Amino acid sequence: MRRHIAFERLHNFRDLGGYWAADGRTVRWGRLFRSDSLGKLRGQDWDRFLALDIRTVIDLRYPWEIKRSGRVPHYQGLSYHNLSIEHQPYNQAGLDSDVEPARFLADRYTEVAHDGVKELRRALNIIADSTAPLVFHCHSGKDRTGLLAVLVLALLGVHEDDIVADFTLTDLATERLVAEWNADYPDLTLRWPAYGRAPAEIMRLFLADLITRYGSVYGYAAEQLGVDDGLVTALRRQLLHP
């Protein structure tokens, strides 16, 4: 199976299937996807997307981002949810070049993990209830999307090393994400060299912060999101092979 699914205008569309869970089962292929903005879908990309039979889209962006850049086109049978998990916007492209990415972004993820509890819990509920293929996305498919991917994979029992490795796969899309930014903003300068990058240390620091404070990702999810064994069981029933 292919983890990366090729599109012309989408740069970071990936299947989260195939990872081993703690109980020896694996995540189903073709059931859970992560992506950059689906507002770019058109032409042959639209046909490729429809062929995946996705029935649910979770859009993690701010409403103003959707107004600016568009959303996934409506189609028959689509369930669309806009859950803006980030509450304190910041401009990565405009950061000073000396801002160290790992600590800075790990702190932003921790911020989102505590500001966006209502939206994150809702997203987990939607995923647990979905019986058909689902995709969640933000703008570049790295930070907000990466955070939700961490929560889902961790609750499925996927090993931390695989969770971190999945996060770093955005690096394969970095060149295209940077080129897209430059094309979208020809009159501006991309100041931050780390824009679009996904070094493992970001996710290692974020996970270490959660574990230090809550004992585990499940501990965080239980205390902050109200996740219980019933929700975890539902996620595993939907997304893991029997």
Image (cartoon, rainbow, N blue to C red):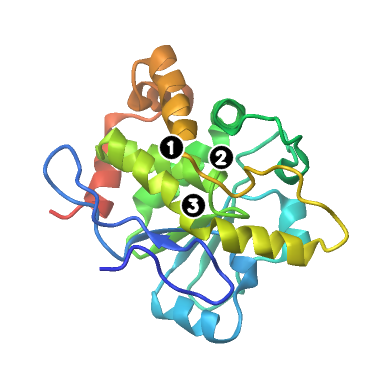
Q: Residues within 10 Å of mark 3 (few under 14, many from 20)?
A: some
Q: Nearer the viewer, mark 3 or mark 2?
A: 3
The furthest residue to the right: 187
Q: Residue at x 41, y 21 (%)?
A: 208
Observer able to see residue 170: yes
- Of the pair 139 and 8, the residue shown nearer to us: 8
Q: Residue at x 85, y 55 (%)?
A: 188
User: What amino acid type is highlighted by mark number 3?
Assistant: Asp
Compute the Cα span from label 3 to label 1.
10 Å
Q: Secondary structure at mark 1?
A: helix
Observer able to see residue 155: no
Q: Position of residue 77 (x, y in %)?
A: 48, 74
Q: Quadrant of the N terminus?
A: bottom left
Compute the Cα span from label 2 to label 1.
25 Å
> Please, is residue 78 above or below residue 68 in the view?
below
Reading the image, the residue beneath label 1 is 200
- Of the pair 125 and 144, the residue shown nearer to us: 144
Left or right of 85? Residue 186 is right
Reading the image, the residue beneath label 3 is 171
Q: Residue at x 40, y 37 (%)?
A: 151
Which quadrant holds residue 24? top left
User: What amino acid type is highlighted by mark number 1?
Assistant: Ala
Disc ID at residue 119: 2
- Of the pair 67 and 44, the residue shown nearer to us: 44
Q: Residues within 10 Å of mark 1 (few under 14, many from 20)?
A: some
Q: Position of residue 109 (x, y in %)?
A: 56, 32
Q: Residue at x 48, y 52 (%)?
A: 170
The answer to which of marks 2 and 1 sits earlier in the sequence is 2
Left or right of 104? Residue 6 is left
